[in-house]
Amino acid sequence: MKDLSRLCVHTITTRPWPLARAVEAFADASIGGMTVWRDAVPEEGPQQAGERIRAAGLEVVSYCRGGFFPHTDAQKRQAAIDDNLAALDEAAALGAPLLVLVCGAAPGQSLERSRQQIRAGIEAILPRAQALGVRLAIEPLHPMYADTRSAINTLRQANEMAEAIKSPYLGVAVDVYHLWWDPELEHQIARCGENAHLFAFHVCDWRVPTRDLLNDRGLMGEGCINIRQIRKWVEDAGFDGFHEVEIFSMHYWNMDQAIFLKQIVQAYKEHV
Ligand code: ZN
């Protein structure tokens, strides 16, 4: 049987479940890790949530998400920085070693200007990240999200920014959903390895056809992404962390989450 110790599931993948229920179900399934989304942190707060997760034998893999730095308005840019500092404090309380950044984009300005603001935002929060011992990962998003979600759309752009800022606390997250199509992917993943800044690996699949631009991600094996090939490139680059299942899907959120979790484990064994 395939070892599930490196399988991590994001709380948003089983979004209908409150955190406590997800912790119990993931632990029962022998899943090794959990990535916690900000909206999944319960009333008890991040510290208790972290203790609950570890007590069940799960590792807190990362905290999702920070970012959304660009705005045409300077006050909003400052508010975004403050919000990211708060997210870092929450990640530290949770015991998460990594905060994932969906960097943002402001449609009223150029993507280049948005990238400059992303860089300024990251530089503004790096000292706190370092003080707390929480690393940051730039997650490049598919270009269909360049309007409002991220002006960083290729792994090359993420690598260039990480190399320009250059800190052991800053790296990148490779998500197969966003990057599978990129002819430079193998080369850019190897480049992450040379800089030792590949911090996270997210998996799901690209459904054909995709029925919704945000909430129709597929289960691994259900679409056109060669996940095994990308996993090999990632491991050749020295990555030995978790394989994180991150699926936003109205279809799967509408079904019995216990059955869905069984399907996730099966798909992980067969296709990752
Ligand atoms: Zn992701």
Image (tube, grey):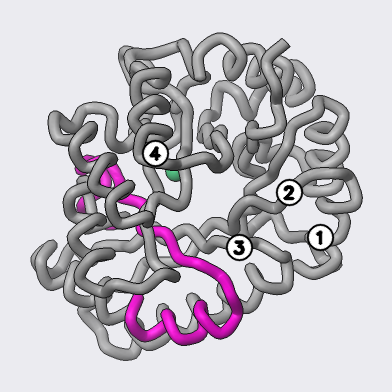
Residue at (85%, 44%) from the top-left corner?
A: 57
Asked if residue 165 lies in the magenta stretch, the reply is no
Q: Specify which label sits upstream in the sequence, 3 or 1.
A: 1
Check mark 3 vs ligand 1: CB closer than 8 Å? yes or no: no
Q: Is residue 184 left or right of residue 202?
A: left
Numbered mark located on residue 49 in the image: 1
Numbered mark located on residue 238 in the image: none
Mark 4 residue type: Asp
Mark 1 residue type: Ala
> Which type of secondary structure does the marked residue at label 4 adopt?
strand
Mark 1 residue crowding within 10 angstroms, few (<14) / some (14–19) / many (20+) = many
Q: Nearer the viewer, mark 3 or mark 1?
A: 3
Check mark 2 vs ligand 1: CB closer than 8 Å? yes or no: no
Q: Label 3 belongs to which residue?
A: 97
Q: Nearer the viewer, mark 4 or mark 2?
A: 2
Residue at (41%, 69%) from the top-left corner?
A: 168
Give residue 220's position: percent from left, percent from top: 49, 18
Mark 2 residue type: Glu
Give residue 118's position: percent from left, percent from top: 27, 72
Q: Nearer the viewer, mark 1 or mark 2?
A: 2
Q: Label 4 belongs to which residue?
A: 175
Q: Is residue 254 left or right of residue 236?
A: right
Q: Label 2 belongs to which residue?
A: 59
Distance in Å between CA atoms under marks 1 and 4: 25 Å
Where 231 falls versus 99 (above or below)?
above
